[in-house]
């Protein structure tokens, strides 16, 4: 038992986190920056931070994730990192030739108080930024927030760097939230199927889930083009999917360029996907036969297999934007959601989960950790866990089937290629959940209850 020291008794903790259910802000900022075409993320801090952020993304996607670093030494830690960042900007444009450098800060540069807007302005004044090239920036101190907050901060950086006021055009913006490249493809599939003209940013599809071609490309063909980012201020509206990751950017774009926004849940499960489809319909989209067919397939599987879900207890851990629609979906299809834990802080999370579950009788905690989730499970065992790779320790010790959802997933593949958003994503979610439950039943059923047909 790897976690044999986790006690059943829950003691209120304030100053100690054990196995946080989140990663740090720059990971999210780096991920968002990779969703811009020909963009090189840059970590303004020490090499160790950048190495960690890159390796977290590389392990999750099984793809080489490129990023530069200001490589702080003791000197820059004391006197500030301006000289390092100025040299880095020159070197990056000279050697790696990106169209955009996306600078995010780290705990160290935030603590020093480096003024990134001033440094990047100085770089421009000194001619270090070639014509037609851009630097965008985000403040991502990791002692607050999480990777989801960092993602949201870089979205604001993208808007700050590219969006301008102008005559409104017919398209709408979509900020897809901190979701997989496969999920971003699914969002595009839905908007295309409904015939809606959209600009989605960021877009990591075809960046972190591309094919093996035998050739290394530093800048894959995916990512939102700069020309599209420059149109975001002209959109007639923005659909922000997921209030924590996408909400701040949508609000900022409204303030900066007068683009109104609608905030939606991530389209996970039938109800949330219906809401997304309806929002597109209100903006001129037509619900296609294709989407109706996909929705019907989800309903068909649910009708056929609902008996295996009904009343099963489930624990969820992950990011708030995922957990709310997941709780709603699982409750809708008959699960009894018992424990929901996120590492990302946010007081509204508790009320949103209770509303999604339709009950006050549920254990919910924000800014929390895996240790607490394990204690909850020790006090009330569940039949299924949905969470990232770190959940496997609890699942193994407590002999509970695990469905890997969220970030990071270091020990499986599939999340890059197959969505959990949209109707097709709902189908995949059901398949994964069903397989986990039925595999467990096959493994543990006594001989007289071992079924051929399920
Ligand atoms: S020091 Fe801060 S930014 Fe760097 S890896 Fe740790 S939490 Fe992340």
Image: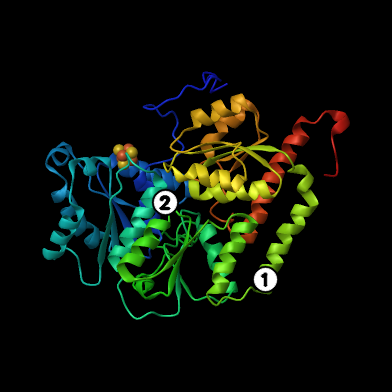
Colour scheme in use: rainbow
Q: Residue at x 38, y 65 (%)?
A: 37
Residue under pointer 1: 290
Ligand 1: image quarter: top left
Question: Which tag, 2 or 1, sits closer to the chain's start?
Answer: 2
Residue under pointer 2: 64
The quadrant the N terminus occupies is top right
Is the residue marked 1 within 8 Å of ligand 1, measured from its CB?
no
Quick one: 207 or 249, which is closer to the camera? 249
The quadrant the C terminus occupies is top right
Q: Give the secondary structure at mark 2.
A: loop
Residue 148 seen anywhere in this rendered image of the structure: yes
Q: Is residue 71 left or right of residue 216?
A: left
Q: Is residue 247 left or right of residue 83?
A: right
Give the spatial CA distance, label 2 vs label 1. Answer: 35 Å
- Please rate how many residues cluster around mark 2, counting C-alpha atoms within 10 Å: few if below 14, some from 14 to 19, many from 20: some
Q: Residue at x 21, y 72 (%)?
A: 131
- Indicate the position of residue 392 as horizontal and vertical percent values: 57, 34
Q: Nearer the viewer, mark 2 or mark 1?
A: 1
Q: Residue furthest right?
A: 448
């Amino acid at each position: 038992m790897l976690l044999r020291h986790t006690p059943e008794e829950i003691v209120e903790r304030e100053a100690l986190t054990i196995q946080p259910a989140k990663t740090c802000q720059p990971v999210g900022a780096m991920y968002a920056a990779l969703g811009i075409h020909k963009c090189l993320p840059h970590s303004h801090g020490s090499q160790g931070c950048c190495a960690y952020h890159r390796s977290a993304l590389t392990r999750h996607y099984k793809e080489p994730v490129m990023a530069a670093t200001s490589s702080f030494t003791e000197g820059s830690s004391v006197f500030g990192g301006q000289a390092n960042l100025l040299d880095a900007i020159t070197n990056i444009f000279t050697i790696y030739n990106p169209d955009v450098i996306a600078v995010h800060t780290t705990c160290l540069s935030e603590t020093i108080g480096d003024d990134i807007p001033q440094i990047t302005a100085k770089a421009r004044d000194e001619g270090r930024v070639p014509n037609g090239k851009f630097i965008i920036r985000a403040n991502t101190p990791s002692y607050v927030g999480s990777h989801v907050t960092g993602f949201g901060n870089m979205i604001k950086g993208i808007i700050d760097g590219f969006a301008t006021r102008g005559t409104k055009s017919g398209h709408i913006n979509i900020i897809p939230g901190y979701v997989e490249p496969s999920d971003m493809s699914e969002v595009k599939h839905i908007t295309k199927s409904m015939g809606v003209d959209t600009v989605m940013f960021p877009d990591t599809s075809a960046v972190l889930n591309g094919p093996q071609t035998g050739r290394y490309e530093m800048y894959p063909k995916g990512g939102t083009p700069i020309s599209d980012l420059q149109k975001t201020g002209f959109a007639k509206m923005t659909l922000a999917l997921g209030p924590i990751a996408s909400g701040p950017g949508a609000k900022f774009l409204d303030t900066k360029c007068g683009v109104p926004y609608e905030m939606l849940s991530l389209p996970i499960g039938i109800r949330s996907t219906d809401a997304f489809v309806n929002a597109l319909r209100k903006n001129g989209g037509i619900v296609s036969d294709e989407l109706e067919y996909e929705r019907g397939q989800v309903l068909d599987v649910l009708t056929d297999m609902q008996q295996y879900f009904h009343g099963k207890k489930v624990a969820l851990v992950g990011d708030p934007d995922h957990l709310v629609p997941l709780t709603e979906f699982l409750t809708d299809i008959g699960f009894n959601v018992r424990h929901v834990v996120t590492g990302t802080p946010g007081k509204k999370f508790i009320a949103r989960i209770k509303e999604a579950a339709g009950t006050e009788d549920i254990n919910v905690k924000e800014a929390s950790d895996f240790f607490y989730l394990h204690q909850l499970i020790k006090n009330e065992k569940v039949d299924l866990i949905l969470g990232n790779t770190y959940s496997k320790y609890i699942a193994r010790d407590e002999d509970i089937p695990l469905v890997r959802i969220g970030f990071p997933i270091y020990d499986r593949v599939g999340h890059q290629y197959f969505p959990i958003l949209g109707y097709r994503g709902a189908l995949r979610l059901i398949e994964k959940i069903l397989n986990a439950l039925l595999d467990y039943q096959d493994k543990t059923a006594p001989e007289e209850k071992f079924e051929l047909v399920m």
